[in-house]
Image (spheres, grey):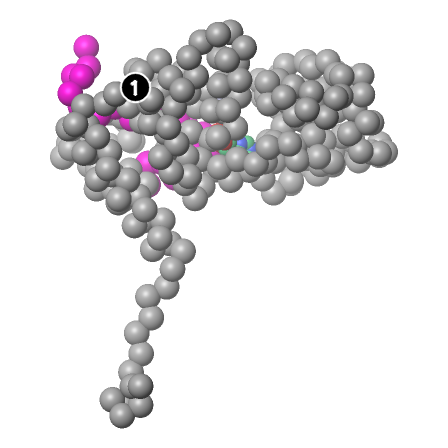
Amino acid sequence: MLDNNRLRIAMQKSGRLSNETSKLLKNCGLKINLRQQRLIVFAENMPIDILRVRDDDIPNLIMEGVVDLGIIGKNVLEEEVLNRVSKGYNAKYIILRKLDFGICRLSIAIPINKNYLGLKSLQNTCIATSYPNLLKKYLHQHHIKFKFCILNGSVELAPKVGLSDVICDLVSTGATLEANGIKEVEVIYNSQACLVQRYDKISYFKQKLINKLLTRIKGIIQTKTSKYITLHISSKKLK
Ligand code: ATP
Ligand code: ZN
């Protein structure tokens, strides 16, 4: 059983967010060895435990209060929030800070050789996606009726195998879509990684530690986007 007095942070075990997340935690001063295949890693120099899980599990771990903090893409967080709300479960959390990685967008895309005449082209189509809730929210707001088929990976395959001509998937550079003969026609959600805290009350001791980490994270992000300049000038010209 884990010690409840130690701060628990969930991060993606292996995937697009893992490297940047472990770099960030290490830059915050945590001594952790993430090279092992362990699912729980104890920081050697701070009262912090790291849970390494699939990214899709992180929102539930936060909203069920199992972890105090999580680093997760907003796309996955919002998708799970919509899912939980539709089932009547609590879906509360606090975004402490947007992070400078995991930047991508959830977009609708179609085969290059198909015409696109705006959202009305999507009326009564079937759309392949791993994000049914975000897609439903967006298209309902625009009064578009559609069906979806859920694929949990390789969504770009759907047109090739005849599952559906329209897909809704994550895009960063667009290279994967292009390589599969698909073009992006509509951005429905912009996303990036963020640091999320569970909503319910946290002990004074843990909150103090969270604030310390947050100050360090702000500093780390700031130094990446600013330059420190020194120059020599004669004191006569100083004014
Ligand atoms: P897991 O095995 O943990 O479930 P996954 O395959 O679902 O991993 P990844 O492909 O590693 O997830 O993506 C994790 C997150 O990285 C995405 O949810 C998104 O927030 C972000 N991301 C950034 N750029 C991209 C991109 N081009 N394609 C997909 N995800 C991206
Ligand atoms: Zn995932």
Q: Is residue 84 above or below residue 193?
A: above
Residue at 25% from the left image edge and 89% from the top image edge: 235
Residue at 35% from the left image edge and 35% from the top image edge: 96
Q: Is residue 70 left or right of residue 209?
A: right
Instruction: Choose top left, top right, bottom left or bottom right for residue 106.
Output: top right
Q: Is residue 159 above or below residue 174?
A: above
Question: Within the magenta stretch, is there residue 18?
Answer: yes
Q: Is residue 153 left or right of residue 39?
A: right
Graded by Cα atoms within 10 Å as few (under 14), some (14 to 19) or many (20 or more), the crowding at tag 1 reads few
Q: Is residue 31 above or below residue 121?
A: below
Q: Is residue 217 left or right of residue 152?
A: left
| Secondary-structure class at tag 1 | loop
Instruction: Choose top left, top right, bottom left or bottom right for residue 126.
Output: top right
- Specify start and end residues of the magenta stretch as a single range: 1-23
In terms of depth relative to the viewer, which is nearer, 212 or 29? 212
Instruction: Choose top left, top right, bottom left or bottom right for residue 227.
Output: bottom left
Which x, y percent locates residue 230?
30, 74
Residue at 26% from the left image edge and 44% from the top image edge: 215
Which x, y percent locates residue 98?
42, 39
Q: Residue furthest bottom?
A: 236
Q: Quadrant of the C terminus?
A: bottom left
Q: Quadrant of the N terminus?
A: top left
Question: Within the magenta stretch, is there residue 9?
Answer: yes
Residue type marked 1: Asp
Q: Residue furthest top?
A: 87
- Whether residue 78 is visible here, answered yes or no, is yes
In terms of depth relative to the viewer, which is nearer, 202 or 195? 202
Which x, y percent locates residue 223?
34, 55
In terms of depth relative to the viewer, which is nearer, 38 or 130? 130
Q: Is residue 178 above or below residue 146?
A: below
Q: Which residue is mark 1?
A: 200
- Whether residue 32 is visible here, answered yes or no, is no
